Amino acid sequence: VAFRYVSNSEPTAMLMDCSLGISLYRLTQAVIPYGIDEIIHIGIYNYRCIGGGDPSTGCTPSQHAYATAIDLHAFGLAGSTETYSTEDDFVITTRADPCPIPSFNDKDRILKELACTMWSGRIFNIVLTPNYNADHRNHYHVDLTAGSMYLGSGVEGVDPAIEGLGH
């Protein structure tokens, strides 16, 4: 499974924490059964706060600032130019849909199954889908926030309160 930045046509090198590399390997194993051979992302490392801004101002740093997050935009189907796109194929429902997330067609179903697999398989600790808010309509934000387990809404008694995410 190759990874590439959304505006590039070829696979691209990625700067990340080693723990994210392990999770991305686990993600590749989860997507292969769907015939996916490419993961298209819109960013990993970015020194910023949750919701924007510079961490030196005292806000809560995003996991992107630690290179332990990636924004997943689409998944490419092997042997074709077809993709499962979070922007075009994910049907918005409600913010806190539990797994399985209601789906409306095959592409939507696969995208939502992948989100649930990333979360329930503990590939990532936080999985924000396009259902989360307008800022996430074109990607899954996934990260390795320590001690968390979050898919659209917190799990009472398990998730710590995380500024900028709510419960």
Image (spheres, helix red, strand yellow):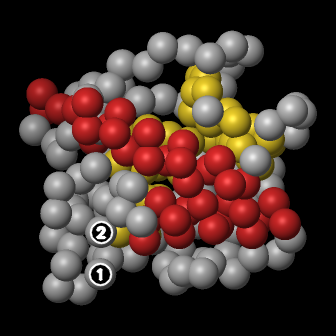
Residue flagged by tag 2: what amino acid is it? Met
Looking at the rendered structure, which numbered label has been put on residue 30? none
Name which residue type carries label 1.
Val
Distance Cα–Cα, label 2 vs label 1: 7 Å
Lateral position of residue 148 relative to residue 90, left or right? left
Mark 2 Cα within 10 Å, few/some/many (few <14, many 20+)? Answer: many
Q: Horizontal placement of 81 versus 37: left or right?
A: right
Q: Residue at x 36, y 19 (%)?
A: 15
Residue in the image at 56% along x and 54% along y: 30
Regarding mark 1 in the picture, which secondary structure is present there?
loop
Q: Report the residue at 44% width, 39% height from top.
A: 25
Q: In which quarter of the image is residue 3?
A: top right
Question: Which residue was labeled with disc 2?
Answer: 149
Disc on res. 155: 1
In percent of the image, x 67 and y 33: which residue is there? 38
Q: Give the position of the N terminus as an image quadrant.
A: top right
Image-based side of 49 in relation to 122, left or right:
left
The answer to whether residue 65 of the structure is visible from this angle is no
Asked which quadrant contains residue 50, the reply is top left
